[in-house]
C-alpha cells in the first residue's frame, strides 16, 4: 500500500501569556491511501491539534509546531509557503468540523457555499459547470439538488452536516479530516450520516482521519486506530489489533471499561481514576502513570518505548493482557 | 400494592408558538417506584426535559396530574410547594452553565441549605458542606475554588452535592453525563448508582444515550415527539423491543465491537415538527410499517407482556387477537 500521510515526531505548543501548553509531544502517524484512521481520545488529548497541524491552521501567534515533519504524498508540508498551503486546503486536504451549526455561513445559500470551493480551486470552470457540480455533490450526500437555493437555517442538523461533507468533498480531496462529524447529531441521524460516509468512502476511495471519542463509531468505520493521551499516541494498530488484540495499553483498557456495553449486563463500570495531567506541567516518564493501576517505579521516571507486535504498537513499559473479545 | 413515589396522569404541556401549539409533552402516564430509576430516552426535541421539569413543577402543565408520594402537587400553594421541593431535586446536563460562576464551591453547595432554612448555624452549614463534598468525592481543598477552576467531572460532582444537600427522595437527572468524557462519565455514573443504593434515592434519568440508560435504569420510557411510544422494564425493552421507533433507535447505535461492524440499520427521514402534529402515531411518516390505521386519533397503549406497554397499531390489532402477547 502507498503511504499518503506520514507525521514524524510532531511537537506542538500553545503559548499564552501565562503558560506554555504542550499539546502534542512527539506524534508519529502514518495513513495509507484509501484507508480510514480513527484518532481516539478524550478532551485535551490533542486530536484536534493534530488535525489542525496537518491543515496548518493552528491559531496564529498562539499555536506553534516546534519540531517534526508532516509528509503529504512525500512532500513536507511544513516547508510550503502559505500560498501553496492555501492551494492544498480544500482541494488536496479538507476538513469537517464538529458543529455543523457554526461551520456554515448563515448569509449564503448552501449552493453558493458548495460552489465557492469548486470555483476557488477550478478557475477554468464555467458557471453552469460549477452549478452542475454543486447539484452532483448535493445528490451524492442525499439532499435533493433543488434545495441548493435554501439557507443553512432551513436545514436540520443532520442535513447541515451533509452540506458540510459535500463542501469538504467538492474538490475530490485525497485526504479528509473529520473532527467529530457525528457528535452533535441524534443517534438515528448519526446512523444515516455514518452509513453515508461508509458509502462515500467505498465509492470515492478518499483517505480519512476520523477524530472521535466514540469507540462505537470507530468500530463502524475505521481501518486503523490511534489512541491519544496527553499529546501522545499511546497505542495504535489495525482496528482488529485494538478491538480484538490480546495486549493493550492500560489507558485503552480503561477507555473500553468506561463504556457501558449494550450487549452485556454489568453492575458497575470500571472507570479510570483521576484526570488527565495538566498540559502545562507534564509529568516525566509515562504521562498515564499517575492514573495507571499497573504503575511501577520505572513508569514515573522513564518515558516508555514503543512495544511492537506486528502492526500493533503500544507505548507502555508493561502492556497488559486484556480479554480480546470485547 | 405499593404506591409509586412519582406518578403522572395524562400529563400534557403545549407551548404556544407563532405557528401554533407545540406539543412538547402529550398525554404521558408514568410511575416511578421508590428507590428505582426510570430512564427516559429519546432524541432532541422529544420532550424528555420538559417532562422532567413538569414532574418538579418547574413549569406548569397544560393539563393532567402529577402525584408525588400520593399527593397531587398541582393542588399545592406556593408555600407547600416550597416545602415539597426539598424532597425533589434536579441535576442538569451542562456543569459549565448550571453553576453560578461567581460563587465558590462551598457557597454553591450551601445555598439550598440556607434558602430552605434546614441549618442556621454557620459552623453546622460548613460541616454539612464538607460532609456532602466527601459523599460525592470532592477533595476538601476545593472548598473555596470557583467552578471555572475545575474540570467537567468535578463540576458535575458539585451539581450532585447541591442536589443532595436537602436529603431529597427524588432527583431528576437531565443528561447528567452527556457533556463529560467517557472515563469521567463512568466515574459519575458509578457515584450516582452508589448514592442510590446508600440513600434509597429515586431517579428519573433523562438521556439520549441508550447504553447509559440501560446501565442505570430499572424501567425505560421511550419518547418520540412528546409521546411515550414504549414503556418496559430495562431487560425486557432491550431483549424484546416492540415499537418500530425503539427498534430503529437500538439498531442505530454504533456498538464498539467488530462483530457489529457495518450493521447499522438506517431509518429514513427526520423528526417531524411538534407544532400542531397530525392525529395518530407521530412516527408514522418515518415508519417502515406505516399504514392508514396509524393515522387514527385514538391509538392506545397495549400491554404486550407484564408491565411492557407499546403504542403501535402493529400491536393494538394483533395484540388483541393473540391475547396480548408480543409477536
Image (tube, coloured by chain):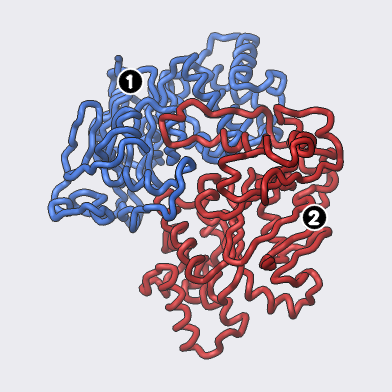
Chain colours: A blue, B red
Q: Where is residue B157 in the image (x, y as percent from the top left)?
A: 47, 64
Q: Residue at x 34, y 28 (%)?
A: A224
Q: Choose mark 1 or mark 2, whichever is in front.
A: 2
> Between A148 and B284, which is closer to the camera in this rendering?
B284
Position above or below: A292 against A172: below
**Mark seen at residue B301:** none
Asked whether, in this view, residue B316 is left or right of residue A315, the answer is right
Q: Which residue is drawn at 45% across and 62% down?
A: B191
Badge 2 marks a residue whose secondary structure is strand
Q: Where is residue B9 in the image (x, y as percent from the top left)?
A: 78, 59
Report crowding for label 1: few under 14, some 14 to 19, many 20 or more residues within 10 A (C-alpha).
some
Q: In which quarter of the image is the N terminus of chain B?
A: bottom right
- Which residue is identified by label 1? A32
Q: Where is residue B121 in the image (x, y as percent from the top left)?
A: 52, 90
Q: How far apart are marks 1 and 2 (CA)?
A: 55 Å
Asked whether, in this view, residue A57 is left or right of residue A322, the answer is right
> Between B312 and A236, which is closer to the camera in this rendering?
B312
- Which residue is identified by label 2? B12
Q: Residue at x 56, y 31 (%)?
A: A191
> Between B307 and A278, which is closer to the camera in this rendering?
B307
Q: Where is residue A262 in the image (x, y as percent from the top left)?
A: 49, 42
Badge 1 marks a residue whose secondary structure is strand
Amino acid at each position: 500500500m502507498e503511504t499518503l500521510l506520514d507525521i514524524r515526531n510532531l511537537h506542538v505548543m500553545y503559548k499564552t501569556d501565562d503558560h506554555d501548553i504542550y499539546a502534542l509531544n512527539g506524534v508519529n502517524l502514518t495513513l495509507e491511501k484509501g484507508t480510514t484512521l480513527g484518532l481516539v481520545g478524550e478532551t485535551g488529548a490533542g486530536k484536534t491539534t493534530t488535525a489542525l497541524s496537518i491543515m496548518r491552521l493552528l491559531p496564529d501567534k498562539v499555536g506553534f509546531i516546534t519540531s517534526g515533519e508532516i509528509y503529504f504524498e512525500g512532500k513536507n508540508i511544513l516547508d510550503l509557503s502559505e500560498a501553496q498551503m492555501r492551494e492544498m486546503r480544500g482541494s488536496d486536504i479538507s476538513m469537517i468540523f464538529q458543529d455543523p451549526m457554526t461551520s456554515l455561513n448563515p448569509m449564503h445559500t448552501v449552493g453558493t457555499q458548495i460552489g465557492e470551493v469548486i470555483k476557488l480551486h477550478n478557475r477554468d470552470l464555467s458557471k453552469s459547470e460549477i452549478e452542475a457540480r454543486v447539484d452532483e455533490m448535493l445528490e451524492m450526500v442525499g439532499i435533493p439538488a433543488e434545495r441548493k437555493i435554501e439557507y443553512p437555517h432551513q436545514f436540520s442538523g443532520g442535513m447541515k452536516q451533509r452540506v458540510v461533507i459535500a463542501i469538504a468533498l467538492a474538490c475530490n480531496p485525497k485526504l479528509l479530516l473529520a473532527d467529530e462529524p457525528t457528535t452533535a447529531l441524534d443517534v438515528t441521524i448519526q446512523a444515516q450520516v455514518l452509513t453515508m460516509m461508509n458509502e462515500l468512502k467505498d465509492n470515492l476511495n478518499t483517505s480519512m482521519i476520523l477524530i472521535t471519542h466514540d469507540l462505537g463509531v470507530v468500530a463502524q468505520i475505521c481501518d486503523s486506530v490511534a489512541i491519544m493521551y496527553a499529546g501522545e499516541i499511546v497505542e495504535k494498530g489495525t482496528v482488529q489489533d485494538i478491538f480484538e488484540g490480546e495486549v493493550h495499553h492500560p489507558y485503552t483498557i480503561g477507555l473500553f471499561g468506561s463504556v457501558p456495553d449494550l450487549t452485556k449486563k454489568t453492575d458497575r463500570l470500571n472507570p479510570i481514576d483521576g484526570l488527565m495531567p495538566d498540559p502545562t506541567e507534564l509529568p516525566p516518564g509515562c504521562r498515564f502513570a499517575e492514573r495507571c493501576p499497573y504503575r511501577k517505579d520505572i513508569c514515573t521516571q522513564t518515558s516508555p518505548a514503543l512495544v511492537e507486535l506486528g502492526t500493533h504498537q503500544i507505548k507502555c513499559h508493561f502492556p497488559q493482557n486484556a480479554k480480546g473479545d470485547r | 400494592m405499593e404506591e409509586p413515589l412519582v406518578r403522572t396522569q395524562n400529563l400534557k404541556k403545549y407551548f404556544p408558538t407563532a405557528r401554533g401549539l407545540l406539543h412538547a409533552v402529550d398525554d404521558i402516564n408514568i410511575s416511578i417506584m421508590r428507590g428505582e430509576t426510570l430512564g427516559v430516552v429519546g432524541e432532541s426535541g422529544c420532550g424528555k426535559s420538559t417532562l422532567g421539569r413538569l414532574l418538579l413543577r418547574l413549569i406548569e402543565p397544560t393539563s393532567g396530574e402529577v402525584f408525588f408520594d400520593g399527593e397531587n402537587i398541582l393542588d399545592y400553594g406556593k408555600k407547600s410547594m416550597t416545602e415539597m421541593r426539598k424532597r425533589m431535586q434536579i441535576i442538569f446536563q451542562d456543569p459549565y452553565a448550571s453553576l453560578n460562576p461567581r460563587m465558590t464551591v462551598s457557597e454553591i453547595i450551601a445555598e439550598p441549605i440556607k434558602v430552605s432554612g434546614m441549618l442556621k448555624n454557620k459552623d453546622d452549614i460548613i460541616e454539612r458542606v464538607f460532609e456532602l463534598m466527601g459523599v460525592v468525592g470532592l477533595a476538601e481543598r476545593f472548598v473555596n475554588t470557583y467552578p471555572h477552576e475545575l474540570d467537567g467531572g468535578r463540576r458535575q460532582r458539585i451539581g450532585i452535592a447541591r442536589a443532595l444537600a436537602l436529603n431529597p427522595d427524588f432527583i431528576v437527572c437531565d443528561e447528567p453525563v452527556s457533556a463529560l468524557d467517557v472515563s469521567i462519565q463512568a466515574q459519575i455514573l458509578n457515584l450516582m448508582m452508589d448514592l442510590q443504593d446508600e440513600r434509597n434515592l429515586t431517579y428519573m434519568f433523562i438521556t439520549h444515550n441508550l447504553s447509559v440508560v440501560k446501565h442505570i435504569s430499572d424501567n425505560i420510557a421511550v419518547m418520540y415527539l412528546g409521546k411515550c411510544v414504549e414503556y418496559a422494564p430495562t431487560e425486557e425493552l432491550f431483549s424484546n423491543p416492540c415499537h418500530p421507533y425503539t427498534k430503529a433507535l437500538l439498531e442505530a447505535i454504533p456498538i464498539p465491537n467488530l462483530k457489529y461492524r457495518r450493521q447499522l440499520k438506517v431509518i429514513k427521514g427526520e423528526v417531524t415538527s411538534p407544532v400542531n402534529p397530525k392525529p395518530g402515531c407521530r412516527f408514522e411518516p418515518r415508519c417502515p410499517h406505516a399504514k392508514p390505521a396509524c393515522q387514527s386519533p385514538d391509538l392506545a397503549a397495549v400491554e404486550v407482556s407484564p408491565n411492557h406497554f407499546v403504542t403501535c397499531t402493529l400491536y393494538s390489532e394483533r395484540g388483541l387477537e393473540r391475547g396480548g402477547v408480543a409477536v
